[in-house]
Image (spheres, rainbow, N blue to C red):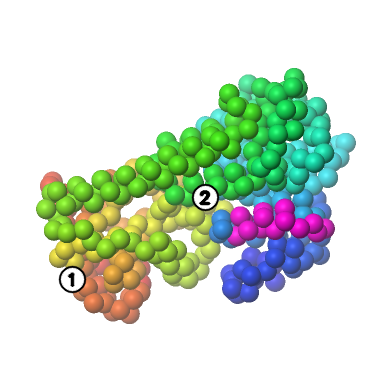
Amino acid sequence: MSLVGLWSRSRSQLESKHVQQIIGIAGTGKLLDGEDASKEFREFLSSVPSSLLSRYATECLAGKFDANGLALQDIVNQIGRRLGFHVEDGRYRGSSAQIGHDGLWRSSFGNEIIVEVKTTDAYRVSLDSVAAYRKRLVQEKQVQESKSSILIVVGRQDTGDLEAQIRGSRHAWDVRLVSVDALVRLMLLKETVEDPRMLKKVADVLVPQEFTKIDGIIDLVFSAAEEVRHDAEETELGEELASGKIKRAPQFIPSDFHAACITRIEKSLNRPLVKQTRATYSSPDKSLVVVCAVSRAHTRGMYWYAFHPHQKEKLEDAKDGYVHMGAVQTKLFSLFHSRTSPSGLKECGSRSWRTDSIGMSVFGKKTANFFSEEKKGFSEIHLTKYLIK
């Protein structure tokens, strides 16, 4: 059975394994260009949560084992995908007949990044060789010179010597440097935001800017995004209290409630889901998209959710799309298929949904009757018939 098959059937058994053990289970157990083990390992990485990618990266750097550098290359490329890039995996080992870059990342905003992954900066990096990869890609019209750049990803944060090497070279304005740790943090940051403008900033931070090493920029973005997210939550709560919609501050949503919802949805749909943003999840191949909205209980059995234009676009672009609404206190599971859900669900902005059966059992063991209390100008929508049990 393939790694992905094992992951779907017995996730708990694989979660505790070291990345070296995971590779040993894949195919022949050796990472080689074009071989089944490599394909299985990359497919597996596309299905696991970001927390495991972070742990695997640490394991590749913490101890030497066969192919730890090759595994790190695949992990970094998967992080690139989680950051929203379209990634072309590079070769493990160089070949005179093929370009030897470790990965080619393309963003939807036009940036093209040639990636080089190093477990350590103990040895000098041949910037001329990496620059030659870019030149050849330009000559073969795979990238545009004006839009392409080089990103060197290294295992260490203490990269002073390598920074000096880059600054002193003729490639200084085309090359940028980032540690694996900072790249992981950037991936985790992306998963906490929902605003598309922030997602563009996440992509832009990896292309040439004024600074050679971009860890400091990532720290700044990380702090700013956390503050914006906190302010948004406080503003929403304050507006509800001021308007009289709620009489007192409700209980807050548990930090693991989103994850619990997604676990249930995966079982319901029999598909693995990977977190893309704070509320959006997708299958590894992006054919399935789920917008997962959750709410704490307000007065009168009310639950408040927001449905935004960019979420609507993501559902429409996917082959298969669902909207999930979870209620914390009742552990309510409601899942609506975006192709058959009521047209009112496609209206944007905050809206309220409530149920007349607050004490219901979990996940459709008893039927809940849903209807919406619309903003002025919208008629009430009965949602029960759209519920997927």
- The answer to whether residue 23 is left or right of residue 110 is right
Which mark, residue 188? 2
Residue type at numbered disc 1? Asp
User: At x 80% / y 41%, what residue is drawn?
Assistant: 122
Is residue 62 magenta-colored? yes
Q: Tell which residue pokes out farthest to the right in this image.
A: 96
Residue closer to the observer: 93 or 54? 54
The picture places residue 373, in percent across and down from the top left corner, at 16, 57
Residue closer to the observer: 114 or 340? 114
The picture places residue 207, in percent across and down from the top left corner, at 59, 30
For label 2, the SS is helix
The picture places residue 310, in percent across and down from the top left corner, at 38, 43
Q: Is residue 358 visible?
A: yes
The picture places residue 146, in percent across and down from the top left corner, at 63, 21
Residue type at numbered disc 2? Leu
Badge 1: few (under 14), some or many (20 or more) residues near its Cα, within 10 Å? few
Residue 58 vertical placement versus 152 (above, below):
below
Residue 101 vertical placement versus 155 (above, below):
above
Which mark, residue 356? 1
Is residue 115 magenta-colored? no
Q: Sequence order check: which comes first, mark 2 or mark 1?
A: 2
Q: Quadrant of residue 170?
A: top right
- Give, as a single range, the part of the protein colored magenta: 52-66
